[in-house]
Image (cartoon, helix red, strand yellow):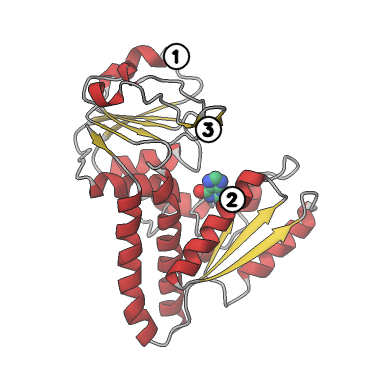
Amino acid sequence: MIELKGKPVADFIYQQITSELQSWKSSGWSLPHLAVILVGADPASQVYVQHKQKACEKLGFKSSLVQLAENITEKDLTEKIKQLNSDSSIDGILMQLPLPTHLDAKKFSDLIAKEKDADALTSSSLGLLVTGQQIIASCTPFGIIEMLDFYKLNVAKKNVLVIGRSLIVGLPLFHLLTQKNATVTLAHSQTVDLKSRLKEFDFVFVAIGKPEYFKPTDFKKDAVVIDVGIHRLENGLVGDVSSAGAAEHLSAFTPVPGGVGPTTIALLMRNTFKLAEKNRKFAT
Ligand code: GUN
């Protein structure tokens, strides 16, 4: 079985960005700049945001953290996003999710200017993805596609299953896999009797958000299983799929932690870089 570790994939992407930054620097352009909005003080979000800032630092990008109070009003958040949209020194904006419950994530994500949508979560970015015109895509699904390429796992003509239809993972992944010529089935919380159908699929992408909901033998023998879930249980971090027996039953499997996770921030950096490149070219 191949253990699909994310770190080598992320390192490969960081190397690509670093080498492209060499010619960037000689062009005299200012360095890419990512602004991260954090509303409230959710501990997990704080950690994720710190990792994003560290990645910027490591590459030499500029980063700004915009920390806003948990009880911010809709009006004030709208104002803040508009202000960042019109700040010409900023290339990419990411609003860390989840937002506090009084704020509608879809509505506020959609206020981010499409030229600065580093997370590719606006209706505009999702529309470009559906029509195959995207230059960036949501970081987790984009990282998964990079991982497939890196480990030379070809989904073309394969029956593949995506479990979960979120705007941040399942839905964009459905489109990216379709662009790779896979035959894609999208299952979700209303799918009837999902477990009985799992053995039909060569590749399964699991983003169901329930700790160890599946076990490796639920899938076809020698299937490739990509687990997007990460949950903190008393005995440590686990995915949506339990790992016991994966080596014997599957041909490739993502460890949790250390699988999909490390690719996500690398893709955020690449998205920011691509937006910055487009913005600089547009401005000259
Ligand atoms: N929360 C967890 N993952 C993500 C992500 O990829 N983007 C944003 N904006 N929020 C998240």
Q: Position of residue 169 (x, y in %)?
A: 46, 40
Residue ID at (33%, 58%): 11
Q: Is mark 2 on a helix, strand or loop?
A: helix
Q: Is mark 1 on a helix, strand or loop?
A: loop
> Residue at label 1?
192
> Residue at label 3?
231
For the N terminus, the image quarter is: top left
Q: Position of residue 224 (x, y in %)?
A: 26, 31
Q: Is residue 273 left or right of residue 70?
A: left
Label 1: few (<14), some (14–19) or many (≥20) C-alpha neighbours in 10 Å: few
Q: In this view, does 111 lie to the left or right of 165?
A: right
Residue 27 in the image: above or below residue 282: below
> Please, what is the three-letter code of the amino acid marked with disc 2?
Val
Given contact means CB atoms under 8 Å apart, are the residues at marks 2 and 1 in contact? Answer: no
Residue ID at (50%, 43%): 168
Q: Residue 192's quadrant in the figure?
A: top left
- What's the CA distance linking mark 3 and mark 2? 14 Å
> Residue at label 2?
47
Q: Residue 88's quadrant in the figure?
A: bottom right
Q: Residue 183 carries which label?
A: none
Residue ID at (49%, 35%): 230
Label 3: few (<14), some (14–19) or many (≥20) C-alpha neighbours in 10 Å: some
Residue 166 in the image: above or below residue 81: above
> Please, what is the three-letter code of the amino acid marked with disc 3?
His
